[in-house]
């Protein structure tokens, strides 16, 4: 028989506090019993509990030893008095002679003048200070480390009592971040424009520890070890998946932290004081965080990030579930906050409640950004420490246009952004009202306004915008969100859905346009010095014709009797087009012999985005069924200015005479040859740029969904007769840009741009 280990004093107190928690009485009565029990067990004459109220005020809620009529009367601001200092610093404080401590303030109603020594600890939950728990003695005495740890452990239980029983309004608790009430503004990167206001939901919810006290430390150690084991395996798998590159060193540091033996030892020590494994993990987290926050070293701050994440993961493993908030009940105005997020994870959420997303990572071409754009949800990425700084339920403003996030904004900021959001909503409603009206100019010219799409979700914009069809379906996105090349069947199923959801409206499918900034996770491109001009897009598929043939095959099968429009990206010379045309013909013949119903019409067109092709337009126009100008790439090649390099991307203006002359040349040649021409780069979606394009002779534009309303409003106020002459005179302008002149024209003619 093994002899039972003696129960330590902290464990005994903890067990008694747990019994009180589980016992009868309302929350305040139980809190009273707890302070009495602490005073008794810790041999203190006084034990008091202060709770944080709105406005950073600590209110005395329960006391053993001080005058009872001081309860709910005595209030101290954060930073005021020793209690206020503990709350402000978020750290325990021992004062052998409290009244001679520089921070001491005397409150006569408490009758505390007779007590000399004090030990106080913050009551924390999720790193938030919710109050202070303090014991006092008459004689000037020292407190041991063990006593301090005991009180800290009991403070965790009290935190649960406060939060779980709503001793104060939860909205009051949410306001205190770290040590102070802080509205915050984070700068990040614009991933999707727009403005969203709502309540924070952590994508990976923090696990709130429910059971704090345990009877069997050995069992808790075993649980800890098991959870650590599964967590390490999950992290190793994550590491193995991560390709060499910018993230792997970050992940390595993270994995190292996870295996830090000091961390594990501290958790085990906390278990020995009588805590459950979960409570011990939380306890060590809170302590470590408080220490790390006081250090200014950016490396340490970064590790804090890891600590937050690892703690939560470990708690999830201990709870036996690793998951996101997607399955939980969401506030009607949810703003998701995450370190990173995959596109599928975003789609798991109920879209009607999403107002915005804040990420610590992510670039504009990340898949989650692409999906968010399709859903028209503002996203700010690279918002440093967002997860640690936000508590669920916090009010957030996601200002995608200006790449900033406001956390717990003050009333004035909130009012300003609410007004801006309302005026946007009114604008949207006005644009939505145009959806069933045609895009016709005042002088009766019909303009074709189409959508750019890349995921099925984008098609949801067809009806509300009243767009005439899909002018550019970027098929590469379907390749980018997978872990391997999609098969012909998988592609055909996707394209069939696109056609089905577009109904009678035409769709132009662009073949795979990868390389440059669009990377396939399973494709290992050799590093190139100049990827935008490298082995990308059509160059890859011409060198790997099977990929192209499979895509043609899938498109033919998907069309099955319907019209099929295929567009080739980055064609630089006529021979490239001929080569692809030959492949398409072969595939059409192959499918015919297999009995696949042929498309009603199979049209093959090209994008015009490599300037060289313009010098071979005549020959090209004899071969193609249509042309679509990709002004994004065309512009970067024409001006030799990388579109992804912020230092040069905006150096030149697409409304400069050079670009306009180029575009004029193209549209004139296409019209003369009777070849339909569209422009599908970003400029088509900017009303003033679109106005210039109409003046040049373009009658078909393809753009992102949110741009259709503003462009249609512009078209419906426009008289083309005068505009065409005006724009033509501008082609000879020596100015760097004709933008100011066009703006003046729009203003003088009452055209909203
Ligand atoms: C373009 O280059 O203008 C275009 C529409 O293609 P992407 O932006 O996909 O390169
Ligand atoms: Mg392009």
Image (cartoon, rainbow, N blue to C red):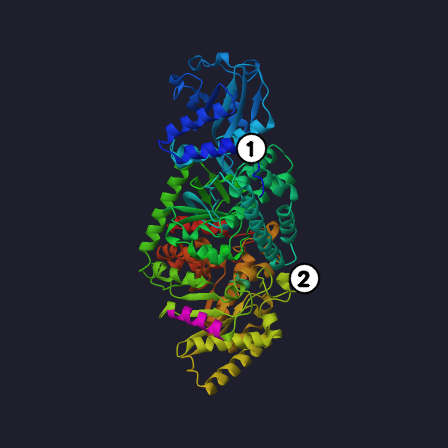
Whichever of callouts 2 and 1 sits on the residue coming sooner in the sequence is 1
Asked if the beta carbon under badge 1 is closer than 8 A to the nearest atom of ligand 1, the reply is no
Query: In the figure, is residue 145 to the left or right of 111?
Result: right
Q: Is residue 297 above or below residue 441?
A: above
Main secondary structure found in the magenta portion? helix
* In contact (CB < 8 Å): disc 2 and disc 1: no
208 shown above or below 11:
below
Question: In front here: 741 or 575?
Answer: 575
**Could you say whether the residue bearing mark 2 is in a helix, strand or loop?**
loop
The residue carrying pointer 1 sits among few (fewer than 14), some (14 to 19) or many (20 or more) residues within 10 Å by Cα, namely few
What numbered label is drawn on residue 527? 2
The circle drawn on residue 38 is none
Q: Nearer the viewer, mark 2 or mark 1?
A: 1
Q: Is residue 87 above or below residue 577?
A: above
Q: Could you tell me which secondary element the residue under label 1 belongs to? A: loop
For the record, the magenta segment spans: 489-500
Q: CA distance from mark 2 to mark 1?
A: 62 Å
Residue found at the far front of this picture: 1
Q: Is residue 310 magenta?
A: no
Q: Quadrant of ligand 2?
A: bottom right
Label 2 CA crowd tier, 10 Å (few <14, some 14–19, many 20+):
few
In the rendered image, residue 96, in percent from the top left (x then y), is placed at 58, 18
Q: Which mark is residue 8?
A: 1
Quarter of the image for the N terminus: give it: top right
Percent position of residue 469, x then y? 39, 66
Residue under the point 56% across and 48% down: 222
Work out which residue is located at the far bottom of the displayed protein and give it. Answer: 593
Q: Is residue 133 visible?
A: yes
Quadrant in the rendering for residue 467: bottom left
Residue at 58% x, 62% y: name it: 519
Q: Residue at x 58, y 66 (%)?
A: 610
């Amino acid at each position: 028989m093994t002899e039972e280990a003696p129960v330590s004093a902290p464990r005994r107190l903890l067990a008694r506090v747990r019994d009180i928690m589980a016992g009868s009485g309302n929350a305040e009565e139980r809190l009273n019993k707890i302070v009495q029990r602490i005073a008794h067990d810790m041999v203190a004459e006084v034990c008091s509990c202060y709770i944080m109220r709105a406005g950073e005020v600590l209110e005395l809620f329960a006391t053993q030893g001080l005058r009872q009529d001081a309860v709910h009367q005595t209030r101290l601001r954060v930073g005021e008095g020793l209690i206020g200092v503990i709350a402000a610093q978020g750290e325990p404080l021992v004062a052998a002679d409290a009244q001679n401590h520089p921070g001491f303030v005397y409150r006569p109603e408490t009758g505390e003048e007779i007590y000399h020594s004090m030990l106080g600890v913050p009551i924390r939950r999720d790193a938030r200070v919710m109050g202070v728990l303090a014991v006092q003695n008459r004689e000037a005495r020292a407190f041991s480390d063990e006593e301090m740890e005991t009180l800290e452990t009991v403070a965790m239980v009290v935190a649960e009592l406060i939060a779980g029983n709503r001793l104060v309004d939860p909205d009051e608790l949410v306001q205190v971040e770290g040590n102070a009430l802080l509205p915050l503004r984070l700068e990040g990167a614009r991933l999707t424009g727009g403005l969203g206001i709502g309540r924070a939901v952590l994508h990976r919810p923090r696990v709130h520890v429910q059971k704090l006290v345990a009877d069997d430390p050995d069992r808790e150690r075993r649980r800890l070890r098991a959870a650590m084991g599964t967590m390490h395996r999950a992290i190793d798998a994550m590491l193995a998946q991560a390709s060499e590159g910018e993230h792997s060193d970050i992940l390595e540091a993270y994995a190292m932290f996870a295996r830090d033996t000091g961390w594990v030892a501290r958790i085990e020590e906390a278990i020995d004081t009588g805590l459950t494994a979960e409570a011990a993990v939380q306890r060590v987290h809170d302590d470590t965080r408080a220490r790390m926050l006081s250090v200014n070293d950016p490396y340490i701050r970064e590790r804090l990030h890891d600590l937050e994440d690892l703690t939560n993961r470990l708690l999830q493993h201990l709870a036996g579930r690793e998951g996101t908030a997607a399955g939980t009940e969401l506030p009607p105005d949810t703003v998701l906050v995450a370190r990173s997020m995959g596109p599928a994870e975003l789609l798991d959420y109920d879209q009607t409640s999403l107002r915005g997303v804040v990420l610590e990572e992510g670039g504009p071409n990340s898949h989650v950004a692409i999906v968010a754009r399709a859903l028209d949800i503002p996203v700010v990425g690279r918002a440093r420490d967002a997860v640690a700084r936000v508590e669920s339920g916090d009010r957030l403003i996601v200002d995608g246009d200006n790449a900033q996030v406001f956390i717990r904004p003050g009333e004035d900021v909130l009012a300003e952004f609410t007004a801006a959001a309302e005026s946007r909503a009114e604008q949207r409603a006005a644009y939505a009202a145009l959806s069933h009206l045609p895009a016709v100019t005042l002088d009766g010219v019909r303009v074709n306004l189409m959508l750019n799409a890349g995921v099925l979700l984008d098609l949801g914009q067809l009806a509300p915008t009243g767009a005439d069809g899909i002018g550019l379906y970027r098929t590469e996105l379907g390749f980018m969100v997978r872990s391997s090349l999609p098969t012909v069947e998988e592609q055909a199923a996707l394209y069939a859905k696109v056609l089905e959801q577009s109904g009678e409206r035409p769709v132009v499918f662009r073949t795979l346009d990868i390389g440059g900034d669009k990377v396939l996770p399973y494709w290992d491109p050799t590093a190139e010095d100049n990827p935008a001009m490298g082995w990308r897009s059509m160059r890859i598929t011409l060198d790997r014709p099977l990929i192209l043939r499979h895509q043609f095959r899938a498109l033919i099968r998907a069309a099955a009797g319907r019209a099929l429009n295929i567009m080739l990206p980055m064609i630089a010379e006529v021979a490239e087009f001929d080569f692809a045309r030959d492949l398409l013909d072969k595939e059409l013949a192959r499918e015919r012999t297999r009995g696949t119903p042929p498309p009603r019409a199979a049209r093959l067109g090209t994008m015009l985005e490599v300037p060289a092709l313009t010098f071979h337009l005549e020959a090209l126009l004899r071969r193609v069924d249509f042309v679509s100008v990709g002004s994004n790439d065309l512009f970067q090649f024409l001006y030799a200015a990388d579109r992804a390099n912020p230092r040069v991307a905006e150096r030149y203006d697409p409304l400069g005479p050079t670009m306009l002359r180029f575009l004029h040349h193209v549209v004139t040649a296409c019209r003369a040859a009777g070849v339909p021409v569209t422009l599908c780069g970003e400029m088509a979606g900017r009303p003033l740029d679109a106005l210039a394009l109409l003046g040049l002779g373009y009658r078909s534009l393809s753009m992102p969904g949110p741009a259709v309303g503003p462009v249609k409003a512009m078209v419906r106020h426009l008289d083309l007769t005068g505009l065409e002459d005006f724009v033509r005179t501008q082609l000879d302008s020596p100015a760097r840009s004709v933008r100011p002149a066009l703006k003046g024209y729009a203003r003088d003619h009452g055209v909203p741009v």
